[in-house]
Amino acid sequence: MANHTQVVRLREAGQPRGLAERAGILLHGRSRTKQEMLDLATGLEIGGTRWIAPYADNGLWYPGRFMEPLASNEPFLTRSVERCHRLVEDASDGGRLGPSRIFIVGFSQGACIAIEYALRHPGCCGAIVVFSGCLMGPAGTDWHPAGGGTLRGMNVFITGSDVDEWIPEEQTREAGRVLTELGADVDLRIYPSRPHIVSSLELAEARAFLRSRMLEVPA
């Protein structure tokens, strides 16, 4: 008998649809898993949250490196950003949760997608947590938000390291500078000697960041 088992590419945790006070979308890193992101969400300890963890095809949100020209990562980059947008729309629960109650947490490739999403869909979520991520594209890329708007009202927590072999410290700082110039409220942290992981310290600081930004939002 043929095996018709369906491949599950989305997992959820926390509060169910209709009861959640806020929603968080979790974007994994290159060749990592959605379960790793759900485990990370447990460490963030943001109660009342519906967590949504998608899985990229073949574990990749885009095939190349972040510093390559945007065209070299297409059409995968745009597909990943638009998939994220569909999840944000789903997270809104039919409009019950406004943008200020929706946030995105990404690691590595997923963190780069989170930034790219914020640029292409400004105003659609209230915060992004960028664990070891940066801007997509080489120096000189046009990083202005779609529609000529700004990122005013967007809260960004972005982390990096001085020894990260995938995301150099210079690129992390550049992302923080550009996002600040575009109007976002940016909290940038560089962790000395931290490898390409999410450390317990940055997880705790991200938890404090999200609690201050997301838990104090009026209903």
Image (spheres, rainbow, N blue to C red):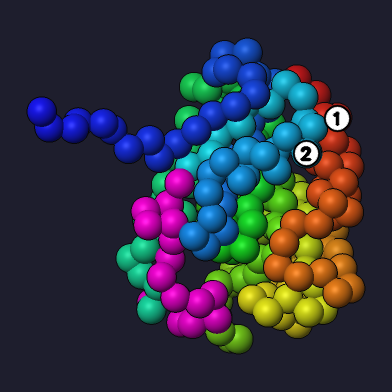
- Do the CB atoms of the residues marked 2 and 1 lie less than 8 Å apart? no
Question: Extreme top residue here?
Answer: 19
Predominant SS along the magenta part: loop
Image location of residue 169, percent across then percent down = 77, 79
Where 70 falls versus 116 (above or below)? Answer: below
Q: Which residue is mark 1?
A: 216
The residue closer to the viewer here, 188 or 125, is 188
Specify the label residue 43 is tagged with: 2
Q: Is residue 100 visible?
A: no
Image location of residue 68, percent across then percent down = 49, 82
Q: Is residue 67 visible?
A: yes
Image location of residue 54, percent across then percent down = 48, 42
The amino acid beneath tag 2 is Gly
Secondary structure of the residue carrying tag 1 is loop
Which of the 4 image quarters holds residue 40? top right
Q: Residue at x 52, y 62 (%)?
A: 30
From which residue to which does the magenta span run? 55-71
The amino acid beneath tag 1 is Glu
For marks 2 and 1, the one nearer the N-term is: 2
Question: Extreme front residue here?
Answer: 1
Q: Residue at x 63, y 53 (%)?
A: 106
> Is residue 205 found inside the magenta-colored segment of the image?
no
Label 1: how many Cα within 10 Å (few below 14, some 14–19, many 20+) = few
Specify the label residue 49 is tagged with: none
C-alpha separation, residue under disc 2 versus residue under disc 1: 19 Å
> Is residue 64 found inside the magenta-colored segment of the image?
yes
Q: Is residue 89 left or right of residue 158?
A: left
